[in-house]
Image: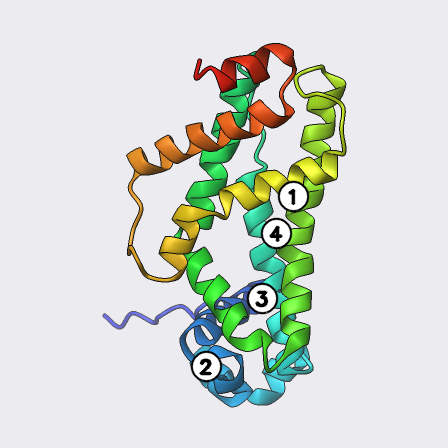
Amino acid sequence: MIVVAEHAKKPSPDERRATILDVAHQAFLREGYSGTSMSRIAADVGGSKATLYSYFPSKKALFDAVAEREGATLMEQLFRVGPSRGDFRADLTELTRRFLTVLLSERMILGHRLIIAESGRFPEIGRMSYALTVRRGLKHLADYFQKAMDGGYLRPSSSMFAAEVFFDLTAGNLHKQRLWSVVQKVDAPSIEIEARRIASIFLAAYGNDDLARNAREGR
């Protein structure tokens, strides 16, 4: 009995685009922006350059699309809102823990190194990546902290400045150690200790009277 294999389902344009972005993301991380060619990406995807260019008219457009998707994924991971515990300190510590976990992940560290390596020769890459990740993240944080100020958990101040302070704290010591390969991995207990430390520092500066006092007294 002869079994006729069914034809593989042809991927939809959206599926094809997602595959191209997956392949391009790995190629950019592996070879850098300047070392990656559209020909190589087309070959890895398994199609022609003409097909690739029908989705993305240039390597810059493809890189922008990869960065846009990475930025959107990052924001979804960081700002996935769960039910409040009714304890702002606990909620802030959870947000800090999530920030550190994402920032210290291999995917984020490799992406950060790529941007640093390429932005000197291609400043537009640095500017675009900053807009899609840091600036977008600061806007989300500012909105979060403004609601906390309106709710009386944080003292009234510039929510954007508070967001910048929080971001600088989370992108501090542990992140630099990972970025510069001082350590290859940060374990969960170390992240937990750092998350609690950062939340305490932040609340000591921005918390309402009770939260700030408890943070300064180590409670």
Residue at the disc numbered 1? 164
Residue 10 visible in this rendered orientation of the protein: no
Please tell me whether mark 1 or mark 4 is closer to you in this view.
Answer: 1
Q: Nearer the viewer, residue 145 or 83?
A: 145
Residue at the disc numbered 2? 46
Quote the CA–CA distance across marks 3 and 1: 25 Å
Do the residues bearing badges 3 and 2 touch, measured as CB atoms within 8 Å? no
Do the residues bearing badges 4 and 2 touch, measured as CB atoms within 8 Å? no
Q: Could you classify mark 1 by the number of other residues whose Cα lies within 10 Å: few (under 14), some (14-19), or many (20 or more)?
A: some
The quarter of the picture where the N terminus appears is: bottom left
Do the residues bearing badges 1 and 4 touch, measured as CB atoms within 8 Å? no
Residue at the disc numbered 3? 66
Q: Give the structural element (helix, strand or loop) at label 4.
A: helix
Residue 219 visible in this rendered orientation of the protein: yes
Please tell me whether mark 2 or mark 1 is closer to you in this view.
Answer: 1
Q: Could you classify mark 2 by the number of other residues whose Cα lies within 10 Å: few (under 14), some (14-19), or many (20 or more)?
A: few
Closer to the N terminus: mark 3 or mark 1?
A: 3
Residue at the disc numbered 4? 72
Closer to the N terminus: mark 2 or mark 1?
A: 2
Quote the CA–CA distance across marks 4 and 2: 26 Å
In the displayed structure image, the side of residue 130 where residue 117 appears, left or right:
left
